[in-house]
Image (tube, rainbow, N blue to C red):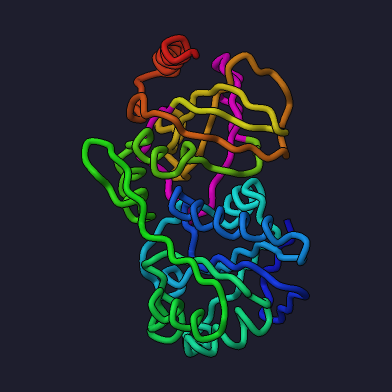
Amino acid sequence: MEIISGTKDIYLNGPSCVAIGKFDGVHIGHQSLIMEITQYAKDHKDEGFKSVVFTFDPAPETFFGGESGVLTSAAEKRILFERKGIDILIEYPFDQKTADTEPIDFLNDLIVGRLGAVMMAAGSDLSFGKKGLGNAKLLRTYGADNGIDVRIIDKLTVSLDKEYEVSSTLIRQMISEAKMEEAEELLGIPYFVFGEIVHGNHMGNKLGFPTINIVPGDDKLLPPRGVYTSDVIIDGRKYAGLTNIGTKPTISDHEVRGVETYIYDFDTDVYGRDAEVYLKAFCRPETRFESLDALKEKLASDIEKYRP
């Protein structure tokens, strides 16, 4: 997958199928957009069509100081888009000039003029251009007037305890309430955190339970502090794990968020490598224990209880 980031000087040589959106979470609704453009590009591969995801960096909400806590970091989106078979990912710089672009100019000059879009897909809640005046209705009209195939995807619904409309906002709420299984239904995969494995305080080794540590960005939404069953992917291999989200209050008074994972039946030096930690189910809240012995006893109990 080609990644174009940090520049507005973009020109694609050849026809493209473009999905436009924020893609926070890359949930099953977003995935339906991706399927539209990848299938269209595949059907026209002899004509050199490319599938293109167009998104903004930072997200407009972040730029304007709105909703906080992203479901997927830029690095996590890149992983997911590549696995979905996207040819080109554009992370277009969002600034005040971008925000003030008239919707028609955005389409004429950028999406069609420089990206060569002959097909576009977007969600029914699409908003772009000055004052958010660009929307799905405008995109449909523009496509009809300019001979461009426009696909507008309505919001999906899922049945859990009731019918839910799939959205990043709803997933954010579920993650904040540690409803990991419900969030997975909307995401299509367990909620995950990606990062480099770094040195911690090595207390896990001292307690007899070695762990890996990754430190997410400040803007990454984490579920409530506690212990979660997890899967971990390192170097393309998947392992079962038990993950603590929090600040390890028994051994530290520092309020530094971390993702610390015990990997079952694993004893390899992986410092400096990247890990994907998929949080599957909430087990218990993070607890301050009276002693390290009490903590060690509880860790041993958790590991045995949740061993797959």
Among the 4 quarters of the image, the one containing residue 153: bottom left
Q: Give me the residue at 38% from left, 41% from top.
A: 183
Q: Give me the residue at 47% from left, 57% from top.
A: 24
Q: Which residues are magenta?
A: 200-228
Residue 35 lies, in percent from the top left, at: 56, 53
Q: Is residue 37 left or right of residue 70?
A: right
Q: Please identify the residue farthest to the left as the structure is shown.
A: 162
Residue 131 lies, in percent from the top left, at: 38, 85
**Of residues 154 and 1, which is closer to you in this image?**
154
Q: Give me the residue at 61% from left, 87% from top.
A: 109
How many numbered badges does the structure rendering display?
Answer: 0
User: Would you place residue 25 above or below residue 136 in this image?
Assistant: above
**Is residue 8 inside the magenta stretch?**
no
User: Would you place residue 107 above or below residue 50 in this image?
Assistant: below
User: Would you place residue 14 above or below residue 234 in this image?
Assistant: below
**Is residue 210 inside the magenta stretch?**
yes
